[in-house]
Amino acid sequence: MRSIRECVDSECDSISRVRPLTDQGMVAQVISHALVRCGGIHRSVTLYSLSFGGSNFHVHPRTYVHGFLQKQIKTAIIILTKKIKSMGKIIIANWKMNPQNEKNAVKLACQSDFLNVVIAPPFPFFGAVKKVLKKAKLGAQDMFWEEQGAYTGEISPRMLKKLGAHYVIIGHSERRALGETDTIVNKKVVAALKTGLKVILCIGEPRQVRNKGLTAVKNFISKQFKADLKGLNLKSYNSKLTIAYEPVWAVSLGRYDKHGKSDTPENAGYMIQWIKKFLNSRFLIRNSMVLYGGSVNLKNAKSFLGLEGIDGALVGGASLRINEFKKIIRISQSN
Ligand code: PEP
């Protein structure tokens, strides 16, 4: 008989999604399948209320759990918890309206092709970039909420899926600055999730709000969340939603604000923890990843990616400087 450790390992290896084990449903599935493989049970059971601490779990009430199985499940949870901790964080490369030709886009994509990386190129380079990606996932920088029709210049979520996109960035501050309201952001989030795309929702406060202090920042962000996630049954989309906390004044280093610079890691870390607690208490969201974005570069990457609770970073400008970006990816993998 194979050991539970071997079975958990081979189950994990067969999953190729980006950072899949932060998804509680996936954790339950891995454990359940591993138990079948090692002969602990004959067919998969529904596991729920798993605790990553390794002490709490329940199986479906109709499943008889004898002492041996209980021990196996506990061991599997401990092994998985260690695996999750050792996994790299996620890095989103937002290329914005760059580079200027397909050849350079392909070059950049080939060099950025690592696990736990999402590349968001401009739409004209989608096909060429998709072709060369083996490990990284493809993401879009925006989309429209309707499926089809007379919407000049827009692209639908289904079109994105067909082009091979796994992710879509929604509500980026550079789009909000062009007039995108919370109502529009909400329609896009709903449409993307319904189509099966993973959403990277950007939220963050402008400089004048930050200047008023943290209470004003929290009020601003909670209003943004309530509007952007309005009407969504988030329980079913929990693990499909990634949040990028991007203080507007820190994005693209001073593009809109001559005093702009990255947030301090202390503030970013505090806000990320607060966002996780807020999402949990307001929307019962427990599995969503929360990233920091705003002028992340080689100099500050370690201090952001080393933060407790941070699940990765959204990187704009530095994702175009390939040597620097590769080093940022390496930092993310070791933190
Ligand atoms: C971004 O595009 O969301 C971003 C954070 O850009 P930059 O890293 O250039 O500030």
Image (cartoon, rainbow, N blue to C red):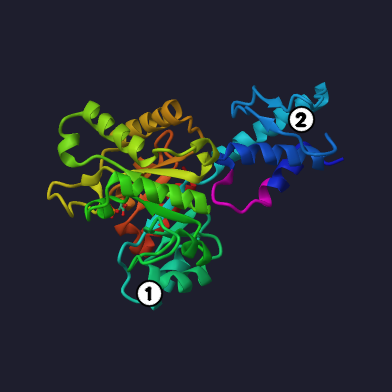
Residue 297 visible in the snapshot: yes
- Write down the quadrant of residue 139 in the picture: bottom left
Residue 114 placement (x, y as % from top left): 51, 59
Residue drawn 55% across the image and 39% down it: 236
Dominant secondary-structure state across the stretch colored magenta: loop
Work out whether mark 2 precedes mark 1 in sequence or the reverse, and give the earlier one: 2
Quadrant in the picture for the N terminus: top right
Position of residue 290 in the picture relative to residue 42 (left or right): left
In the rendered image of this protein, does residue 198 appear above or below residue 140? above
Q: Which mark is residue 104?
A: 1
Residue placed most toward the observer, 89 or 245? 245
Q: Secondary structure at mark 2?
A: helix
In the rendered image of this protein, does residue 291 appear above or below residue 324? above
Q: Residue furthest front?
A: 150
In the rendered image of this protein, does residue 184 appear above or below residue 324? above
Label 2 belongs to which residue?
Answer: 72
Amino acid on which the number 2 mark rests in the picture: Gln
10 Å crowding of disc 1: few (<14), some (14-19), many (20+): some
10 Å crowding of disc 2: few (<14), some (14-19), many (20+): some
Q: Residue furthest left?
A: 258
**Highlighted range, magenta:** 12-20
